[in-house]
Amino acid sequence: METTPNQTISSFDNTFPYMDIARNITKNYENQCSEKVRQEFYLLLNINYQRYFGTTKTNRFFHFYFETLPNYFDYLPFWKQEEKDILAKFTFAQDLRESLFRHDHEWMDLFIELLSKELRKMDPSFIHLALNDGAIKQTTNLIKSRTSRISLKGWKVLHSKLDDIVESGKN
């Protein structure tokens, strides 16, 4: 199976037109917030821009992908309470149970709030469609349950940017 660049959305893409603003926001917190959370924030923005404003109407692959997403949530913290209760019966260790069902979203909420303030006058339609609670929850579910990690080097290889790869230890 082969994946082509036009069939991927990554945190390294600049699909979201205001990514420079998002990167400036997260840069202020890079010593306090993990790189993983910042990359998930960029991915969320790229996915939601692609989904609500991008080429989903013209790109057959993404149109089909977004139109056929299931209505249930695979990411454990988003399961319905009855389902969590059933699973909890089989999970005796309290800390494991809590870690399975916990979704730490404080940094993501902060980044979305700060970005919304910046975009309020520039692009309120993006905030309304792509940064509402439902869109964020749905995209978080996608990120947590249907993504694969890729390094920046892997992204450059996928996008045929081999000349941009810098070996560690070399300038």
Image (spheres, rainbow, N blue to C red):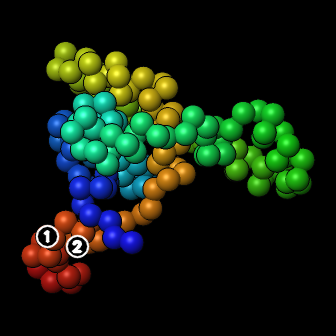
Which quarter of the rendering shows the C terminus? Answer: bottom left
Q: Is residue 170 above or below residue 47?
A: below
**Mark 2 — residue?**
157
Q: Is residue 57 above or below residue 39?
A: above
Does any portion of residue 41 appear in the rendered image?
Answer: no
**Mark 1 — residue?**
161
In this figure, what is the number of numbered marks? 2
Q: CA distance from mark 1 to mark 2?
A: 6 Å
Where is residue 157? Give x, y as percent: 22, 73
Residue ID at (72%, 33%): 80
Which image quadrant for residue 25? top left
Mark 2 falls on what kind of element?
Answer: helix
Q: Please tell me the numbered disc located at residue 145.
A: none
Where is residue 112? Give x, y as percent: 37, 31
Left or right: residue 156 versus residue 136 is left
Mark 1 falls on what kind of element?
Answer: loop
Front residue of 138/91: it is 138
Q: Mark 2 Cα within 10 Å, few/some/many (few <14, many 20+)? A: some
Where is residue 128? Give x, y as percent: 34, 18
Left or right: residue 97 versus residue 59 is right
Which quarter of the rendering shows the N terminus? Answer: bottom left
Left or right: residue 39 versus residue 148 is left
What amino acid type is highlighted by mark number 1? Lys
Pointers 1 and 2 in contact (C-beta within 8 Å)? yes
Residue ID at (78%, 39%): 83
Which image quadrant for residue 72? top right
Front residue of 101/78: it is 78
Q: Mark 1 Cα within 10 Å, few/some/many (few <14, many 20+)? A: few
